[in-house]
């Protein structure tokens, strides 16, 4: 039998990318969920895969998004909490503000899907002891926010290199993608002690040993340089996971299903200089590589393994 690997989708919306990048117009909450959700669900159906989808509370609370979000739940996918305002600096906040942020998102997601989330992923891989405590207090089973890689600061520089942000705004975004110290954290699911009981941390898997990212957005960036090299890179990473008995937990983003022709305002994001058709074909190829080697599961199933 194939060993298990969990797969998740962070359903970040168009406005959240613009907001974090410091671009105008995000306050109007532009959305591409009507494009992303059908594409993602069709691809997952093709592989008979049931995954975890982390939903932003502000999207679940908006009437124009409810049908798309409800469709994810009807398709049988696990529903997770991705915060309410999608702000990576939530990890720096005091406990009452973190509690309000997470519980407000929880209630909005329940209202849109009828499902009580029991898993959380912080925006921009944000984590903190306070956040863990609040999750346990809310009765959550697991957190999936950690990205154990050393290249967080480099990724942050690359992402903001053309952004028109003040020094204060850049400092506020200083937690995005984590710090180099995250590369020292465990690359496997493990228990975390909190003030309110145990919590399981399911990190987004990086390449065993090298600790470089292997999630799909990173693969798309490599494919711009060489499709063959990107494929070999991914195959090697999955082989190392099997050799080291590391159960992978891999991550999709909406832009893995979209191109610059779909959302011109997000051309600043790596890989968005390609068409939606090219991106979708590449994503399907990467999912096939994963499905040939591992049995795809939800993050909740991974946390309970």
Image (cartoon, rainbow, N blue to C red):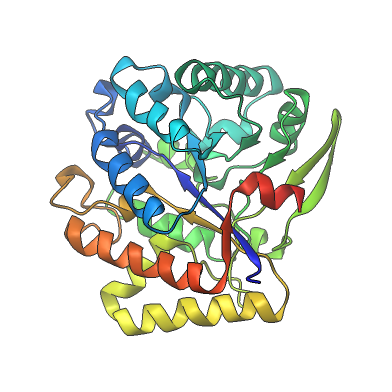
Q: Is residue 261 left or right of residue 187?
A: left
The spot of residue 266 in percent (x, y) is 23, 46
Q: Residue at x 24, y 52 (%)?
A: 268
Quadrant housing residue 220: bottom left
Q: Seen in the image, is 67 located left or right of residue 144?
A: left
Q: Residue 288's quadrant in the figure?
A: bottom left
Between 51 and 169, the one lying in front of the other is 51
- Which of these two is toward me, 66 or 232? 66
Write down the quadrant of residue 74 in the picture: top left
Answer whether residue 131 is visible to the viewer in this image: yes
In the image, taking residue 136 as reference, residue 104 lies left or right, namely left
Which residue is painted at 24% across and 40% down in the image? 35
Residue pictured at 66% horizontal, 77% vertical:
242
Query: Residue 67 or 164: which is nearer the viewer?
Result: 67
Residue 255 in the image: x percent, y percent? 31, 51
Q: Position of residue 14 (x, y in %)?
A: 29, 37
Q: Please, is residue 58 above or below residue 127 in the view?
A: above
Q: Is residue 243 above or below residue 275?
A: below
Above or below — where is 223 with respect to 21?
below
The residue that appears at 73% across and 56% down in the rendered structure is 189
Relative to residue 279, is residue 160 drawn left or right?
right
Instruction: Give the position of the N terminus as an image quadrant.
Output: bottom right
In this rendering, the count of numbered labels is 0
Q: Quadrant of the C terminus?
A: bottom right
Question: Residue 167: where, in percent of width, then height?
Answer: 41, 40
Is residue 165 visible to us here? no
């Amino acid at each position: 039998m194939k060993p298990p690997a969990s797969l998740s989708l962070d359903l970040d919306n168009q406005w959240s990318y613009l907001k974090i990048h410091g671009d105008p117009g995000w306050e109007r909450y532009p959305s591409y969920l009507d494009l992303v959700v059908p594409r993602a669900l069709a691809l997952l159906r093709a592989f008979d895969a049931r995954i975890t989808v982390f939903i932003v509370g502000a999207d679940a609370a908006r009437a124009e998004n409810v049908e798309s979000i409800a469709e994810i739940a009807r398709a049988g996918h696990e529903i997770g909490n991705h915060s309410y305002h999608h702000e990576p600096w939530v990890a720096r906040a005091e406990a009452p503000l973190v509690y309000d942020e997470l519980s407000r998102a929880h209630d909005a997601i329940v209202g849109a899907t009828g499902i009580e989330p029991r898993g959380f992923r912080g925006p921009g891989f944000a984590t903190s002891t306070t956040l863990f405590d609040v999750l346990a207090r809310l009765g959550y089973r697991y957190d999936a926010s950690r990205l154990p890689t050393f290249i967080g600061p480099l990724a942050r520089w690359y992402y903001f290199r053309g952004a028109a942000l003040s020094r204060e705004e850049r400092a506020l975004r200083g937690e995005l993608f984590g710090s180099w110290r995250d590369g020292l954290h465990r690359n496997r699911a493990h228990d975390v002690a909190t003030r309110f009981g145990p919590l399981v941390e399911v990190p987004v898997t990086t390449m065993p040993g090298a600790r470089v990212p292997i999630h799909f957005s990173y693969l798309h960036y490599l494919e711009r340089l060489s499709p063959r090299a990107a494929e070999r890179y991914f195959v090697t990473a999955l082989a190392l996971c099997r050799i080291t008995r590391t159960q992978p937990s891999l991550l999709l983003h909406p832009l893995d299903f979209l191109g610059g022709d779909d959302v011109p305002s997000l051309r600043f994001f790596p890989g968005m200089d390609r068409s939606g058709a090219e991106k979708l074909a590449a994503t399907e190829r990467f999912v096939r590589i994963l499905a040939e080697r591992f049995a795809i599961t939800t993050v909740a199933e991974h946390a309970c393994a």
